[in-house]
């Protein structure tokens, strides 16, 4: 199995984006420097190719682990400089029949690897190279989907940090503040508590901005009767937290906001409570859709019967995304959602998923009652499947109307 990590990426001119390891590479190695490769062989141990020590360069960019450090600190059986990749990799792959490599996901390095593999399979004196190429996701993704206790400890830490950030935001927001002021408070809390930072760009949407699912401008001003939707989570040692809370900037929900919010909350609580081994994400989504569609009919946002609204998918005008996704090293983490027969993958202990129903009423929806227009609400928690049922990793973050309003006294 051959795994590259991410390269450094240019942000502009000679400035780089902050480096983050490739998730599968990190899962296997724990090595946190760019440009590295890992090779795992059933009969030949664990090899790392890393950037070499360079005292002159390290003055500018920081100390490197180097070849010796790759063995001493990260347990590699052998290590080489990445400068020796072209000469050493063919030797290590000599006699290997099957190579696991994720072609199509690493465009920066694939041409060179393809050249090396072709060279191994041509010429009279060439070594016999791999004849079968397999996606490593067939092994790694299932491993990553089922979390170990060590992984869960990191995710619980991320949940605790994220709780503090969301509580601070709901407590401190006021009409007249800019969305980016709250974003700064949230992300400051992440870093102050020792997280790497955010697991994904933070969403802080006030009023109608909360109706944009992936709103990231965060430059609006909170109005007197605006709701604030925050979708933000800390990243701890590469493991993601993904939480959404919606609260009033004024400290009090309006009657229309209260009605829609309670509808979403009831559906979210019911989905969390039903989570257990054997259930599926499709089953969860269907339950949430049915419950919220009935609520939309009761509030006058939809017309007709429940079955008609579901069959014709008229609910999608207000609830257009799925209810859940896997969570782990990536926010939308790896792992199959369907089995080979097309049925949903049953939940099993160790899986972590989000549960995040929402309702979004466009300010331009002339068919909606005026009081509901421009309201966007999402409530999201991170839930671990256990042998007995579930553990809501982020359930301690306030989300009932009473608890949210109590934050402001």
Image (cartoon, rainbow, N blue to C red):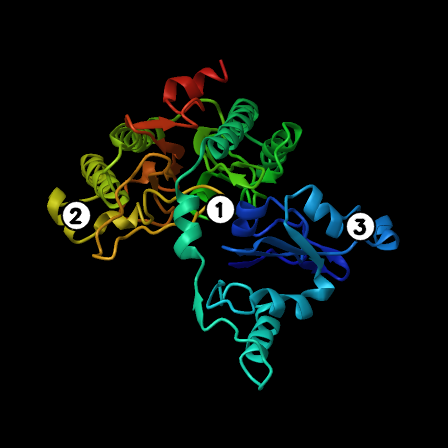
Read off the residue under disc 3.
61
Q: Earlier in the sequence, mark 1 or mark 2?
A: 2
* Residue shown at the point (49%, 63%) measured from the top left: 101
For this rendering, which residue is in front, 45 or 247? Answer: 45
Task: Kindly indicate whether the residue at mark 3 contacts the one at mark 2 (C-beta within 8 angstroms).
Answer: no
For this rendering, which residue is in front, 105 or 177? Answer: 105
Crowd class of label 1 (few under 14; some 14 to 19; many from 20; radius 10 Å): some
For this rendering, which residue is in front, 390 or 174? Answer: 390
Mark 2 vs mark 3: in front? 3
Q: Is residue 158 left or right of residue 306?
A: right
For this rendering, which residue is in front, 201 or 135? Answer: 135
Read off the residue under disc 1.
330
Q: Earlier in the sequence, mark 2 or mark 3?
A: 3
Q: Earlier in the sequence, mark 3 or mark 1?
A: 3
Residue 383, percent across and down? 37, 32
Q: Does residue 302 lie above or below 39 as drawn?
A: above
Under circle 2, the secondary element is helix
Quarter where residue 267 is shown: top left
Between the C-alphas of marks 3 and 1, the distance is 27 Å
Tally of numbered discs: 3
Return the mark for residue 309: 2
| One can see residue 262 in this view | yes
Under circle 3, the secondary element is helix
Quarter where residue 185 is shown: top right
Q: Is residue 200 left or right of residue 56?
A: left
Crowd class of label 3 (few under 14; some 14 to 19; many from 20; radius 10 Å): few
Residue 216, percent across and down? 54, 47
* Residue shown at the point (65%, 56%) measured from the top left: 36
Q: Is residue 217 left or right of residue 141?
A: right
Under circle 1, the secondary element is loop
Instruction: Name, please, the residue furthest toward the bottom.
Output: 124
């Amino acid at each position: 199995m051959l795994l590259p990590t991410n390269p450094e990426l240019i942000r502009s001119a000679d400035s780089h984006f902050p480096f983050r390891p490739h998730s599968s590479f990190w899962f296997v190695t724990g090595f946190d420097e760019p440009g590295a490769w890992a090779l795992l062989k059933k009969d030949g141990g664990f090899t790392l190719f890393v950037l070499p020590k360079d005292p002159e360069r390290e003055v500018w960019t920081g100390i490197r682990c180097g070849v010796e450090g790759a063995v001493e600190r990260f347990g590699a059986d052998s290590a080489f400089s990445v400068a020796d990749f072209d000469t050493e990799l063919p030797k290590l792959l000599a006699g290997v029949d099957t190579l696991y490599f994720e072609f199509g996901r690493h465009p920066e390095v694939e041409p060179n690897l393809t050249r090396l593999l072709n060279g191994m399979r041509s010429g009279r004196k060439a070594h016999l190279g791999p004849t079968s190429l397999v996606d490593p996701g067939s092994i790694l993704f299932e491993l990553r989907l089922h979390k170990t206790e060590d992984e869960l400890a990191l995710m619980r830490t991320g949940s605790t940090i994220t709780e503090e950030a969301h509580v601070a935001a709901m407590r401190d927001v006021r009409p007249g503040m800019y969305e980016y002021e709250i974003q700064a408070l949230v992300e400051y809390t992440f870093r102050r508590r020792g997280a790497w930072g955010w697991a994904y760009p933070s969403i802080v949407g006030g009023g109608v901005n909360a109706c944009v699912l992936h709103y990231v401008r965060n430059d609006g001003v909170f109005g007197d009767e605006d709701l604030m939707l925050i979708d933000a989570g800390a990243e701890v040692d590469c493991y993601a937290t993904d939480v959404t809370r919606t609260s009033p900037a004024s400290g009090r929900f309006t009657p229309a906001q209260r009605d829609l919010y309670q509808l979403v909350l009831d559906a979210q609580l019911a989905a969390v409570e039903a989570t257990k081994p054997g259930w599926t994400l499709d089953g969860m989504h269907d339950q949430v859709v049915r419950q919220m569609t009935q609520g939309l009919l009761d509030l006058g946002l939809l017309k007709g019967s429940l079955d008609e609204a579901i069959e014709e998918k008229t609910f999608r005008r207000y609830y257009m995304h799925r209810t859940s996704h896997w969570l782990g090293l990536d926010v939308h983490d790896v792992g199959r959602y369907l089995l080979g027969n097309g049925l949903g993958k049953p939940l099993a202990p160790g899986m972590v998923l989000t549960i995040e129903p929402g309702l979004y009423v466009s300010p331009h929806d002339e068919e909606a009652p005026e009081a509901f227009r421009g309201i966007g609400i999402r409530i999201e928690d991170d839930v671990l499947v256990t042998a007995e049922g579930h553990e809501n990793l982020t359930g301690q973050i306030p989300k009932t109307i009473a608890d949210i309003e109590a934050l402001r006294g």
